[in-house]
Structures are given as C-alpha cells and as structure tokens.
Image (cartoon, grey):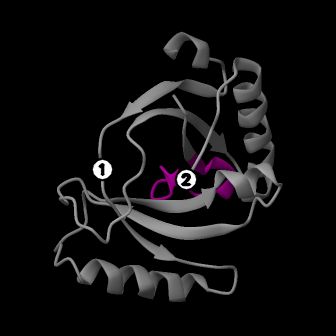
Amino acid sequence: MTGACKNRYQRPCQKKEPRCLITIEIDKDISYEESVELVTAETEKYHLGRLHDASYGSMISVSSLLNGHYDDYTRLFIEIPFLTNKTDLHLPPVGTYLQAFHQGIFENLPMKYEEIFAYARKRGLTLYEYSYEMGINENVIDRIEDYIVQIEIPVLA
C-alpha cells in the first residue's frame, strides 16, 4: 500500500504507533485566548512540567470535511511523547495514515483537502475518524504565506 500513496502532494502512507493525545473540545465561538486557557488548564491536570517535546494541533472530523464543512474543528490536541495511556485521553487509530502538507493561507486549506480526497478516491483509500492538523513552522516564519500545516488522516485497512 505504501507505493500507492505517493504523489507530489502527499507523502507515502505513514505507519503510526500507539499515542495518547490530551484533547479539549472547541467550537467556532471559542476565541484563541480562551482556547489557550483551556489547553493550559487541561495540561496542568497531568502535571507534565515543561512541554518542549509536545506537539499540538487541531482535529476536524473526516465526515465534516467530506460534507464541505472545512471550518468545523471540534478539538485541539497536545501529544506528549512520554504520556502513558490513561482512560481520559484520546487514542488515535494505530496504523496507516495519509500525510499531506499545505503551505500558505488558511483560506486555501479546503483546496488541499479536495486534493487529498481526490487522491484517496483514485486509489481506493477510505479515510476515517479525524484529520489531525499540526503547524510545523510557525515559530520560524515572518509571513503567513510561508506557514506549513501537516495533515494526517487515518486510512482504513
């Protein structure tokens, strides 16, 4: 299957090992400042200390994306590499993920999803659960046009 998932927009399907995500529910009415406060409060529950090894991002359901609701984000997540499995954490599916990258303004992100879905349809791939989006260079850019979002979506085996 790995060979079937290559093109200039997507990296090969990536295997994901078990991981735990701290998540907080969000909606369109929550401001950026409020979401930062919610994330901070949630991470404090786990007494994690420094978060320099953490990855963070947002989640949007594949069903929302397939229905054209590209701004229907429902959760923010923080992945802490050393966090052990706890019952109140989100456990993303283990297995194969389609991985893609979007560079530029957020208003163009729907076009990237359309490319992803066309790519998956053409290869008979079924995407499910959530799309996990992570900004990978926000600390080193000066212009939003240079911003890169890494998108990972589980592929049904």
Please indicate whether residue 81 sits to the left or right of residue 59 in the image.
left
* Total numbered labels placed on residues in the image: 2
Tell me if residue 148 is in the magenta stretch.
Answer: yes
In the rendered image, residue 41, in percent from the top left (x then y), is placed at 34, 87
The answer to whether any part of residue 148 appears in the image is yes
Q: Are marks 2 and 1 in contact (CB under 8 Å)?
A: no
Q: Which residues are magenta?
A: 133-149
User: Who's the residue at 64% across and 33% down the image?
Assistant: 126
In the rendered image, residue 131, in percent from the top left (x then y), is placed at 58, 50
In the rendered image, residue 157, in percent from the top left (x then y), is placed at 51, 28
Q: Which residue is mark 1?
A: 19
- Amino acid at pointer 1: Arg
Q: Is residue 131 above or below residue 11?
A: below
Dot 1, crowdedness within 10 Å: few (<14), some or many (≥20)?
Answer: some
Cα distance in 3D space between marks 2 and 1: 15 Å
Q: Is residue 61 above or below residue 24?
A: above
Q: Image quadrant of residue 113?
A: top right
Q: Image quadrant of residue 117?
A: top right
Asked whether 150 or 85 is in front, the reply is 85
Dot 2, crowdedness within 10 Å: few (<14), some or many (≥20)?
Answer: many
The answer to whether any part of residue 105 appears in the image is no
User: Who's the residue at 70% across and 22% down the image?
Assistant: 124
- Amino acid at pointer 2: Glu
User: Who's the residue at 30% across and 57% down the image?
Assistant: 20
User: Who's the residue at 17% across and 56% down the image?
Assistant: 82
Q: Which residue is mark 2?
A: 133
In the rendered image, residue 139, in percent from the top left (x then y), is placed at 45, 59
Asked whether 96 or 108 is in front, the reply is 96
